[in-house]
Image: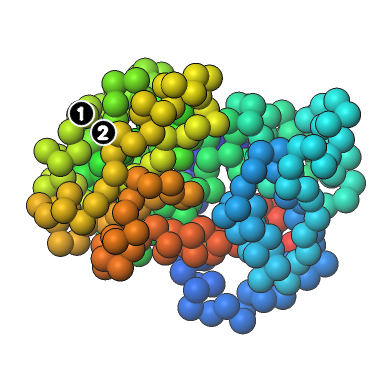
C-alpha cells in the first residue's frame, strides 16, 4: 500500500523509533545498505531553493544504490508553463519510485500525494511543515542525549514562519516530560493554531519570552532559527527583526555544559562562527544525521509500497 510522509504526525512514536534504529544501523553498517535500492529512482521536485534538503535526499538515494532524477527550481519545470501540482505528480509517477517535493505553497505536497501513484515525501511546504528536518532533529537529540523525553527545549528566532519549528514541536510533544521555552520577538511568536492544536490540547508546558539570556541556564536543547527573508511581505519588517538574536560565546556563559545547540540551517548570522568549535554545537551533525534518516525513510516507504 502506498504511503506518504506529509507531516511528522503521520508516523507513530514507535515508527519514529524504528526509523532512528535503522539510521543508527546504517551509520554502523553502511555496506549492508549500499545496494538495497539498486534499480530504484527518487524524483526530487524542488519548486523552491534548497541546498541541504535536496542534496541530502539525493545523497541518501545514491548511498542506497539508487538513482536520482528531478529539478531544483520551478522555472526549470513545467510549472513555469502552468502545469498543476496534481498533474506533475501523476507524470512523475510514471518515471520514479518515490518523490521528495519542496514547494512554497502550504499543502502542495499533500495534493501531490493524493494524485501520485508512488510515495511522496514533504521536503518543506511554505511556512507549514518540514517533517524530514524533524527526523534529522530527533536523531540528533537521541544520539546526543540518549533519549527524547524529560527535556527543556528552547526554540529561538522565527517561530511564526519556521516550518522546522512547527514540525519539531509536533514531534517532541509526544514524548513524556518535554517542556518548551519559546523565544522570539513579539511579531514572530508561535502561531496560535500551533499552541492550540498541539501544546494546549496535550497540556504541554511552555513559556514565551523575548529574553534568551534569562532562560539559557534551564535549557537542555537550544534550537536556533533564522529570520526568513523569503516569508516576509515587508522588507522593512525583515530588516528590523533579522538580527533579533545572535548567539555568541559570551551568551553561553551560564548555559549547561551539556547543552545541545541546534539549527536547521542555513544560518545567516544567528550563530557566531566562534561557536562552531564548541563541543555543544550540533548543527553540522544534524546535517549528517538528516541523510541517514532520509535513507531510513526511503527504505520504509518503498518497502510499505511493495516496491522493495
Task: Tell me the quarter of the image containing the C terminus.
Answer: bottom right
Residue at (26% x, 68% y) in the render: 279
**Up-down: is 58 above or below 5?**
below
161, above or below 286, in the image: above
How many C-alpha atoms fall within 10 Å of the one at disc 1: few (<14), some, or many (≥20)? some
Q: Is residue 20 visible?
A: no
- The answer to whether marks 1 and 2 mark residues whose Cβ atoms lie closer than 8 Å is yes
Splitting the image into 4 quarters, where does residue 200 fall?
top left
In the rendered image, residue 282, in percent from the top left (x then y), is placed at 35, 61
- Which residue occupies the foreground of this view, 20 or 257? 257
Q: Secondary structure at mark 1?
A: strand
Instruction: Label 2: state its secondary structure.
Output: strand
Q: Is residue 55 left or right of residue 28?
A: right
* Residue bearing mark 1: 209
Q: Position of residue 213 (x, y in %)?
A: 15, 41
Q: Is residue 63 left or right of residue 178?
A: right
Residue at figure coordinates x 88%, y 50% from the top left: 95
As rendered, which of 105 and 1 lies closer to the eye?
Answer: 105
Given residues 19 and 92, the one toward you in this image is 92
What is the basis of the colouring in this image?
A: rainbow
Around disc 2, counting alpha carbons within 10 Å, would you say few (fewer than 14), some (14 to 19), or many (20 or more)? many
How far apart are the alpha carbons under marks 1 and 2? 5 Å
The image shows residue 151 at horizontal and vertical percentages of: 22, 48
> Which quadrant, please, contains the N terminus?
top right
First in sequence: mark 1 vs mark 2: 2
Q: With 50 as the anchor, is 144 left or right in this view?
A: left
Task: Specify the quadrant of the image occupied by residue 7.
Answer: top right
List x then y, in percent, for residue 100. 68, 47
Q: Is residue 219 visible?
A: yes
What residue did someone put label 2 on?
A: 183
Compared to residue 12, the image places residue 298 above or below, namely below
Amino acid at each position: 500500500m502506498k504511503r506518504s510522509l506529509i507531516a511528522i504526525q503521520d508516523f507513530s512514536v514507535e515508527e519514529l523509533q524504528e526509523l532512528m534504529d535503522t539510521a543508527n544501523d546504517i551509520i554502523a553498517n553502511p555496506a549492508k545498505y549500499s545496494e538495497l535500492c539498486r534499480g530504484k529512482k527518487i524524483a526530487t521536485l524542488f519548486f523552491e531553493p534548497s541546498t541541504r534538503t535536496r542534496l541530502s535526499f539525493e545523497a541518501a538515494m545514491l548511498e542506497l544504490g539508487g538513482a536520482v532524477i528531478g529539478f531544483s527550481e520551478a522555472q526549470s519545470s513545467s510549472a513555469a508553463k502552468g502545469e498543476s501540482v496534481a498533474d506533475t505528480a501523476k507524470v512523475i509517477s510514471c518515471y520514479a519510485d518515490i518523490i521528495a517535493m519542496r514547494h512554497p505553497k502550504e499543502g502542495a505536497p499533500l495534493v501531490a500525494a493524493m494524485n501520485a501513484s508512488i510515495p511522496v515525501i514533504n521536503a518543506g511546504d511554505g511556512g507549514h511543515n518540514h517533517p524530514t528536518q524533524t527526523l534529522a532533529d530527533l536523531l540528533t537529540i537521541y544520539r546526543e542525549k540518549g533519549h527524547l523525553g524529560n527535556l527543556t527545549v528552547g526554540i529561538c528566532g522565527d517561530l511564526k514562519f519556521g516550518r522546522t519549528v512547527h514540525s519539531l514541536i509536533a514531534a517532541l510533544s509526544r514524548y513524556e516530560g518535554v517542556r518548551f521555552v519559546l523565544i522570539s520577538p513579539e511579531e514572530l511568536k508561535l502561531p496560535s493554531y500551533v499552541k492550540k492544536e498541539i501544546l494546549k490540547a496535550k497540556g504541554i508546558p511552555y513559556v514565551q519570552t523575548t529574553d534568551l539570556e534569562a532562560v539559557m541556564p534551564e535549557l537542555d536543547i537550544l534550537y536556533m532559527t533564522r529570520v526568513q527573508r523569503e516569508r516576509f511581505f515587508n522588507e522593512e519588517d525583515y530588516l528590523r527583526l533579522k538580527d533579533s538574536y545572535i548567539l555568541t560565546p559570551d551568551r553561553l556563559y551560564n548555559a549547561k555544559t551539556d547543552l545541545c545547540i541546534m539549527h536547521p540551517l542555513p544560518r545567516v548570522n544567528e550563530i557566531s562562527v566562534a561557536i562552531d568549535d564548541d563541543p555543544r554545537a550540533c548543527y553540522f551533525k544534524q546535517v549528517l544525521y538528516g541523510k541517514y534518516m532520509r535513507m531510513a525513510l526511503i527504505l520504509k516507504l518503498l518497502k510499505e509500497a511493495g516496491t522493495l
